[in-house]
Every structure is written in structure tokens, then in C-alpha cells.
Image (cartoon, helix red, strand yellow):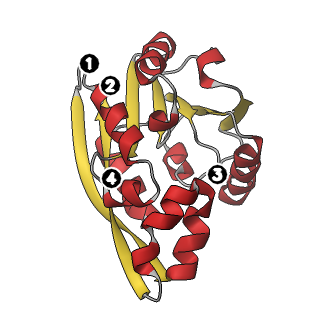
Amino acid sequence: MDSKKLIGNLLDFYDFKNKTIVSVGSGGGQLIEYGHAAKKIFAIDNNEEALRKLKESLAKSGLDDKFTLVYSDFYLADQKGDVVMFEFCLHEMPDQVKAVDHAGEMADDILVLDHWPESEWAYYVAEDKIVDKSWQALRSFHFRKVQKYEAAQLFKDYEELYQKVKVMGEVSINRINPFIGQKNFSIPMAYGFALI
């Protein structure tokens, strides 16, 4: 997936300038470039390995002075900011309504970045049902703004796809069987942003 395009879409969708961001699920650091415009970022993740990767990414980007890494369950976090941003993680939370309600106690703006319902990529990584459930839960809140985007995951061969999805488990591995033997293919990945 073209992460530069995703970041560009994100910067067009929401103005991070001089704002304090509470970023949820930001471990790994794929989207940290938005941090150049922000004043400060609290990066909350409950995965230590993901936070370690984020720390490495921050050191390479020169953004480490803006980020404070917080190892915590989001439901227990109490940082305050201008916006709470869920980075492709809300669908993985056990109670999306509770998560958004908690985010509302932390900031005036809530920004959700996630797979779009019926995304082919969400199907292949066996997250289609929880993504649909998450967007259904979000509909109980007022969207000030929402936008869908189309992208694609690109793979040189089946092995590369297999390595990416194997952590998702047996269902996902079985779903990618149609790609066995294929070379240089893509899988559509629709995603969306919602501002609450």
C-alpha cells in the first residue's frame, strides 16, 4: 500500500497543526509523518514490540522529540489532547462504543482511520466481520466528516502475501489460497476516515 498517499489523504482530511494528538494503536510507526505538523503526540499501544518498532521509526524520522510512548491498554489511558486518533485499530477493540466514549473524555475531536466495510483486504486478513461491526458501532455517533478511499496491497508473489497474513491465523491462510502461484498481483484495500 502506498503509505505516502494515505498520509497525504490524512493531512488533507484533518488539520494537525499545533495540536496535541493522542494516537491509539500507533505502534510500528507507519503513519508518523503527520507528526511534523503536530505540537505533541502521545502514542498509546498495548504491544511492547510495536512500540519498540515505533521508537526505531521515530529515531530515523527525527520526530522522537514530539512523541511520548505510552505502553497501556487504551481503556486505562488518561492522556489529554486536542484529538484522539485510532490508527486502524478500533475494529480490534472489544467494545468500540466504549472506546469512542472514552476518547471523548480525552479530547474534543475523535478521528478514526480504519478499513472500510466490505474491503477485500479485510476479508483476506479475516477481519471483515469485526470491521463491519466496528463501523456499525460508529454509526451511533455523529460524523462531522467521513471519507472513503481506495488503495491496494501489492505483492510480488504468494510467499510475500503469506508472510504478511500468517499471523492472522488459519482462516486468513485458507482465504489466500487463490493466490498460490500468482506473481505481481494486488488486493484492493478500501479504507476510511471519520471525524466525530
Q: Earlier in the sequence, mark 1 or mark 3?
A: 3
Q: Nearer the viewer, mark 4 or mark 2?
A: 2
Are the residues tagged 4 and 3 within 8 Å (C-beta)? no
The relative height of residue 181 versus residue 7 in the rendered view (above or below) is: below
Q: Tag 2's secondary structure?
A: helix
Q: Nearer the viewer, mark 4 or mark 3?
A: 3
Q: Nearer the viewer, mark 3 or mark 2?
A: 2
Q: Nearer the viewer, mark 4 or mark 1?
A: 1
Q: CA distance from mark 3 to mark 2?
A: 26 Å
Label drawn at residue 9: 4
Q: Amino acid at mark 3?
A: Gly
Where does residue 22 sit, x and y in percent of width and height? Answer: 55, 28
Label drawn at residue 28: 3
Q: CA distance from mark 1 to mark 2?
A: 6 Å
In the picture, measured across the screen, residue 143 lies left or right of residue 172, that is left
Q: CA distance from mark 4 to mark 2?
A: 24 Å
The relative height of residue 127 versus residue 178 in the rendered view (above or below) is: above
Q: Tag 4's secondary structure?
A: helix
In the foreground, 129 or 37: 129
Q: Earlier in the sequence, mark 3 or mark 2?
A: 3
Q: CA distance from mark 1 to mark 3?
A: 30 Å
Where does residue 111 sit, x and y in percent of width and height? Answer: 39, 32
Q: Tag 1's secondary structure?
A: loop
